[in-house]
Image (spheres, rainbow, N blue to C red):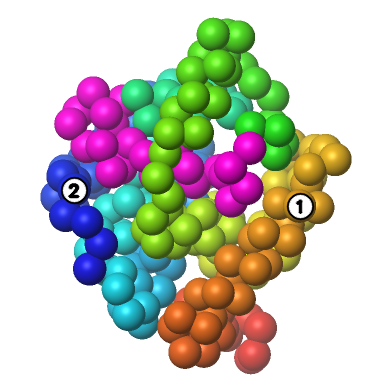
Amino acid sequence: MESEGLLPSLKQAEALLQAAEHRNAGGWVAHSRFVAQAARLIAERHPTLDPQRAFVLGLLHDLGRQTGPNQDRHILDGHDALLALGYPDAARIALTHSFVVPDLATLQGQWDGTAQEWARLGNLLAAAEMTEEDRLLQLCDTLALASGFCTVQERLVDVALRYGFNTRTPDKWRAVLTLKADFDTACGGNIYALLPDLAERLIG
Ligand SMILES: [Fe+2]
């Protein structure tokens, strides 16, 4: 099992997500719920991950959208809000979920914070110790649109169409594809088969 860092209960996480939706409703809330489901389903098949922790982390990974509409500053805002609430593990996931490659230059959105905040984001990322939970949430962030589960490739195209791409995007795509293959191996089969609607859509 992963480290037993303090996390909110499922009920508390749900209340945080609903309060955030009240501040800034959007497709990100449905996306977060699908990410949480994917994380739980994959964790159930994974040798070391905890399904309930995975679900809670999925619900909260984009909590920084509550200050939006916003772009990449949601990463820092989510981290800060969850840390202030006393949930360091969820705060770290809010930070690391966008960094399959741990480099600020791989972000595809606009930086809608200050230069000082950008520097702080870089320092936090450099100090973050990535665990298998971080890797799980990075993967699950690419397995869900607002409308439901999707393939990694569908999500990568969706993000590129909404936010553009840069010279580091191919590196990021390769890293995400490797991440997916790593979880297939760890879970003993294609993780797409664990996501009900997706399996039906792909396989019929
Ligand atoms: Fe997300």
Name the residue located 37 percent from the left edge and 39 percent from the top edge. Answer: 92
Query: Amino acid under label 1?
Result: Asp
The quadrant of the rendering that contains the N terminus is bottom left
Dot label at residue 191: none
Which residue carries the number 1 mark?
Answer: 171
Query: Amino acid under label 2?
Result: Gly
- Residue 33 in view of the camera: no
Question: Where is residue 27 shown, x and y percent of the image?
Answer: 52, 43
Which residue carries the number 2 mark?
Answer: 5
Which residues are drawn in magenta?
81-103
Q: Secondary structure beneath disc 2?
A: loop
The yes-or-no answer for disc 1 within 8 Å of ligand 1 is no
| Residue 84 is covered by the magenta coloring | yes
The quadrant of the rendering that contains the C terminus is bottom right
What distance separates the C-alpha of mark 1 from that of mark 2? 31 Å
| Residue 86 is covered by the magenta coloring | yes
Who is closer to the viewer here, 40 or 120? 120
Q: Is residue 55 shown left or right of residue 138? A: left
